[in-house]
Image (cartoon, rainbow, N blue to C red):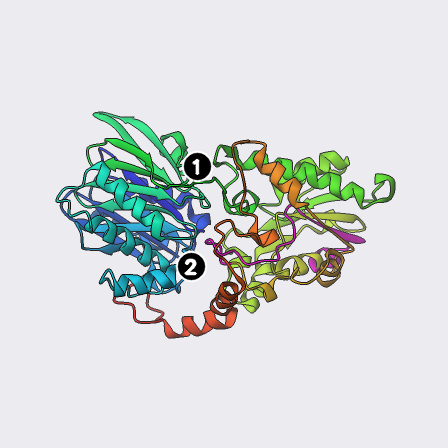
Amino acid sequence: MCGIVGIVSQNPVNQQIYDALTVLQHRGQDAAGMVTSDGRKLHLRKGNGLVRDVFHQQHMVRLVGNFGIGHVRYPTAGSSSSAEAQPMYVNSPYGITLAHNGNLTNADSLQADLFREDLRHVNTGSDSEVLLNVFAHELQQLHAHAPEPEDVFAAVRGVHERCRGAYAAVSMIIGVGIVAFRDPFGIRPLVFGKRAGENGDEYMIASESVALDILGFELVRDVAPGECIYVTNDGQLHTRVCAERTQLSPCIFEYVYLSRPDSIIDRVSVYKSRLRMGEHLAGRILERFPDGKHDIDVVIPIPDTGRTAALPLSHQLNVKYREGFIKNRYIGRTFIMPGQSQRQHSVRQKLNVIELEFKGKNVLLVDDSIVRGTTIKQIIQMAREAGARKVYMASAAPAVRYPNVYGIDMPTPDEFVAHNRTEAQVGELIGADMLIYQQIDDLIMSAREGNAGIVNFDCSVFDGKYVTGDIDDGYLERLSLHRSDEMKKRRDAEISNDSTVIELHNHA
């Protein structure tokens, strides 16, 4: 769930990339990075922390050039070491940098092949470094002194043939241009836009359309599954689908939670899809009461992502909509925090209750999804402490039961509150008087309505069906061991706390 951006402009891009990364900050709060080029040299700054913490005035001054790429990270594969902050770099051929959103599911075998057959060494645990080296090797095999569009497309075709999983990537080749590509299933989002410059069109590639909006770029379209976008340094645009078989199967969790509501993902308004989720959920709630006659006094969303679904839901139920929680904006997203104790501690820091909206009322709380259950259990307890008579809980997404292998660091199955539990059992565990989940068919309808051309969604976190077809129990077991809270603690203990120095990375 990282955020990526690439810009080819006629003016310095450092501030533009900074602004875009700030808008994409919700996609990764662990690290940030930017690399620019003046045509002769690359200029890099990256490190752990938010965009505002990584880039200071002295860094921005050094990031010269009219071309550049940027990245905000939230770690899945690899570790949270500053050495794994992106963009990453290889000097051969040409000098290439790359930023990546997603996860390669065959990263281990690719890394072995890179060392044994391609004679390339990967020094981190990041699958993004693997992807970069595969792309670099495919380019090097062409032996082109100055790569033409056909060379770039051939290299990306080689990447698609070798790599499995989810990858939306943007790369910069020094003296050549910017290359972006999306995996053949289009799992992770990627869009591109253009704007008129003084001497021709300028181009931008980003994870979400909102990043284009704030810089005045017009959204051209989404990058198609398996497609390569190549923009030369002089602003010439070249595009081609470079995969034999493609199928648009975007991650449906982008619409539930990951993307900003003001973004358009694969021609679907995220905001509109969340409104439709609320409408469908209202029908599901009415089914749970005899003759559809409920006793709900007020609908209260869990800010922020619960708001959009809660509003049409309240209209459908003919119940007052009220804000019952005030959010502290300076607390990060709790479900991706590294440890259970940290997540528990942060909930009461994150939300404060408006007691008068709860006292003596039957309250329906609405959230986008329930993952671990840690957060919602405490929120329900807070509602009861505020005087609520009954607390009903509604989730705009179905029960999350399976790990996400495509770039969302959702926990191992045992850490999901819905794992091996019925809806009623989960409700009892989190302390709700009633729990209502969205139906998966209704969720799909909510997202697909905006684009009938979407053949399939990756709904693997809900149904365990992985669209790439290469995930088995053995893979999930290895992933579970790697992603557990205990393993994260162990890796973090091996990493220096000093995030200001980028050196060789020597921690597995």
Q: Nearer the viewer, residue 483 or 4?
A: 483
Q: Compared to 341, does 358 lie above or below? A: above
Residue 121 placed where, x, y %? Answer: 25, 64
Q: Mark 2: which amino acid?
A: Pro
Give me the residue at 18% from left, 55% from top. 91
Mark positioned earlier in the residue sequence (2 or 1): 2
- The stretch of residues the image draws in magenta is 381-409
Decide whether the magenta segment is chiefly helix, strand or loop.
Answer: loop
**Picture coordinates of residue 114 (x, y %)?**
28, 61
Identified by mark 1, the residue type is Val
The alpha-carbon separation of the residues under discs 2 and 1 comes to 22 Å
- Asked if the stretch drawn in magenta spans residue 395, the answer is yes
Q: Which of 28/420 is in front?
A: 420
Residue, far front: 244
Q: Residue at x 65, y 42 (%)?
A: 441
Q: Please give left or right for residue 374 compared with residue 97 in the image.
A: right
Q: Which mark is residue 374?
A: none
Q: Position of residue 337 (x, y in %)?
A: 51, 61
Q: Quadrant of residue 377?
A: bottom right
Residue neighbourhood size for the residue with mark 2, other residues' Cα within 10 Å, grouped as few (<14), some (14–19), many (≥20): many
Left or right of residue 240, residue 234 in this image:
left
Number of marks present in the image shown: 2
User: Quick check: can you spot residue 292?
Assistant: yes
Mark 1 Cα shell of 10 Å, populated few (<14), some (14-19), many (≥20): many
Q: Is residue 332 left or right of residue 424?
A: left
Q: Which residue is mark 1?
A: 210
